[in-house]
Image (cartoon, grey):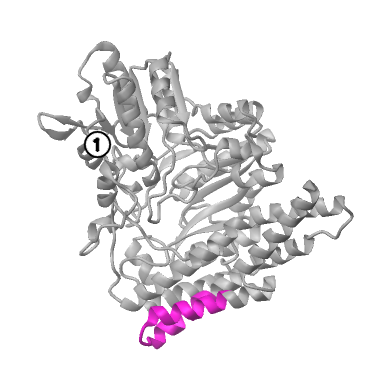
Amino acid sequence: MADAVLLTPREILTGFSSVNNQNVLINDDEYLRLDPAMRLFYEKVRENLGVACIAGHLRSCGYSVRALNLHGRHPSDEAITELVRRERPSFVGISIMYDLHIIDAVRLLRCVRRADPSVFVAIGGAFCTYNAKLIAERIPEADCVAFGEGEMTVEGLMECLAAGRDWRKVPGLWFWQEGRVRSSGPPKLPDLAKESWPARDLLVHHRETGIPTPVASTYTSRGCHAKCTFCYVPRAPGVAVGNAWRVRSPVDVVDEIEYLQVEFGTRFLWFNDDNFGGAFAEGYSHAIGFAEEILRRGVKISFHSEFRVDTGLIDREALHTLRRAGMLSALLGMETGSPTMAKRFRKGTTVEYNFDAARLFKKEGIELEPGWIMIEPGTTIDELWQNLVFIVAAEIAPSENPFSFISRAIALRGTEMYDKVVDPGPPELPDVEGPAKDVLLEARREYRIPDARVEDVWAVWSSVSGEVSDRKEELPFLAQLIADATRARRARREAGLRPLLGRLRRWVEGLPNLLIAFLNVGLLLADEDPPQLAARLEDELRALVDAYDREHLGRTYPDFVADTKRRCAESERAMAG
């Protein structure tokens, strides 16, 4: 039995663009059936670090905890109900990390209630931090909704439940009382210098089921000092002057890394810091102190981090030290190549900073993942041209997915951008019903851009580029088919299909140039502003993509895929015969 059960719901696609870009589209059983060469495409799925931190914190307080992350698992209602009945917890926590979780969260809540109507159920997680009151109003089946950092809040709830005290006095909650939703005030923030390490239940589960665990997530800091209008971190509950950015000891972080390497064979780490580089001298000292501790101990690790361009780490010596310590890649919050857009974002930085940062990353051989917002509520055609000029001049188009540059800011509740959207409209959610839909309709604001040409260009850019991105995501599976068919053919002493792999490789390698052409065509036509701009642009972009496919694949992509699958199927039938 467990004192507490913590659940991370499955991701359910909601029909509109999400704040999350790491959808898990394969379950554990499917993973184990994959060829080992294919598994690398799924080994960088991140843990729910919030639940992991709460589980670790509760265990350090002496509570027994069962933490279940449903990423990659599809348990039935009956299985969840049986879990709760078997564990008989006094507390169940359901973590909604982002919008893709809310539909399954409602299902889990109802399963818990079916198993034990009296058990205390709290909903929490990052998505709840700025939607807590709304979720409490729309999903009254939960006893409360927690917001902000959850360690101290959940500890307080557990203490009150055990002692029979009034839990409504625990800071960091929204709940129903006397016919309306009330709050107990902002949460208490944990002292990161004293916090336990995140629990690793998901990695333990993977190890026990035969799934490799070379990748883990952790953090070195929490919070951010900046005030970007599209981000809700600056308004984090419980944050006050002087504690917007807090850190762990570099020694403690490296101790944890060594534990992960010994226990799970970790070779790559996602650092989930909102701003790994912190604020200027303080951030520099923290990050370089961490890197030097890694180097001093001789720890061999690779890692990915995220930070702003105005951090003190955008420095040749600092980046060189981080690269030596294992930083292979980083998400850098550039956002734009337009000075006026940067000002509206309240970035507090300049386009020149962005350019210098890109140059330094390239010199150090660190893979750069630009944080980028192509479209936001006030974007003009001139600003889109400035973005394109910057992408070309800074040579940042080559990236893991070049077409990710075609992005639109999401006006999320809790951000300044959300507050300033004029005449907002509800998002379209044709496949979502019930309380989940009620929450999602208010958790973000849709907007129209004043310049109708920008809206037309965006509509076509996003539609056609989405198809190109989907094709890129399909490539590993197609490559696996070709490799399998090649082995089968060689076993019969026939010519293999390896030339097809070469064509696919050239198709991928040319995507940065396709992106530049793609953006150019859209903006040139927008400048011309012909009648039925969107229809004209769609015709031209589809013709551009078809020409690109024929250049690299010898035919259009759909025809190439159909022919490749036919040839691979023939090889499989020949082997079976």
**Residue identifier under label 1:** 139
What residue is at 37 percent from the left and 86 percent from the top? 529
Secondary structure under tag 1 reads loop
Q: What residue occupies the far front of the structure in this picture?
A: 577
| Foreground pick, 21 / 421 | 21
| Foreground pick, 180 / 289 | 180
Q: Position of residue 181 (x, y in %)?
A: 16, 35
Q: Indicate whether 329 appears above or below 161.
A: below
Q: Magenta stretch: residue 266 in it?
A: no
What residue is at 31 percent from the left and 77 percent from the top? 452
Q: Magenta stretch: residue 529 in it?
A: yes
Q: Indicate whether 184 appears above or below 82.
A: below
Q: What residue occupies the far left of the structure in this picture?
A: 178
Q: Position of residue 66 (x, y in %)?
A: 45, 22
**Main secondary structure of the magenta stretch:** helix
The quadrant of the image that shows the N terminus is top left
In magenta, the rendered stretch is 517-545
